[in-house]
Amino acid sequence: MNTPNNKFYALLESTVPDPQRLADINQKPQSKINYLICFTPRSGSTLLTEVLSSTGMMEVPEEWFNANDIMPQVLKGKIPPLYPTAFIEGGIPCNNVTDYVNCIRRNCSIPNKVFGCEATFFNCS
């Protein structure tokens, strides 16, 4: 059965860990405020994220756990253009959920250390 959840873990497990690069990334400060927007498709989540990010207090949340879109790019080092300082040469060197979350929280938060994420039920199940 190929569910999004299985694809998420398959992507992580296929990544070759690099303990030295992971240690270097872990030296960066981690976000201090984290938020998750749980949504269903066509529910208005894009409007909500635009309003939140327009305040300048919260970053534009991405679907960091979307195994069909952003996650494969992040693992390869192709961070969405909203995060030019978050580019991680060679991708995120981790193969488990904890390291993945730590890496994106350290590299993809705005200067005031706020990190946001959007996820559907299928991303989190």
Image (cartoon, rainbow, N blue to C red):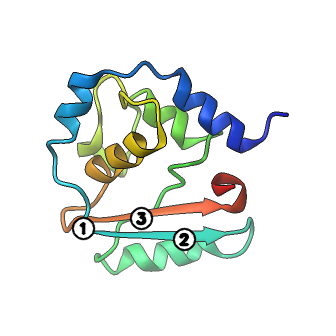
* Circles 3, 2 touching at the beta carbon (< 8 Å): yes
The residue under label 1 is 32
Q: Residue 48 at x, y = what percent?
A: 54, 78
Q: Tag 3: residue type?
A: Gly
Residue 7's image quarter? top right
Q: Whole-Å distance between the Cαs marked 3 and 2?
A: 8 Å
Q: Position of 124 compared to 87: left or right?
A: right
Could you tell me which residue is drawn at 22 percent across and 37 percent down?
A: 25
Q: Which tag, 3 or 1, sits closer to the chain's start?
A: 1
- Local packing at callout 1 (Cα closer than 10 Å; few below 14, some 14-19, many 20+) is few
The residue under label 2 is 37
Q: Position of 111 compared to 16: left or right?
A: left
Given residues 83 and 35, the one toward you in this image is: 35
Could you tell me which residue is drawn at 23 percent across and 56 percent down?
A: 30
Q: Is residue 98 above or below residue 57?
A: above
Could you tell me which residue is drawn at 37 percent across and 31 percent down?
A: 92
Kindly report which numbered mark, 1 or 2, lies closer to the viewer in this rendering.
Answer: 1
Q: Secondary structure at mark 1?
A: loop
Residue 116's disc is 3
Kindly report which numbered mark, 3 or 1, lies closer to the viewer in this rendering.
Answer: 1
Q: Tag 1: residue type?
A: Lys
- Local packing at callout 2 (Cα closer than 10 Å; few below 14, some 14-19, many 20+) is some
Q: Position of 41 compared to 55: left or right?
A: right
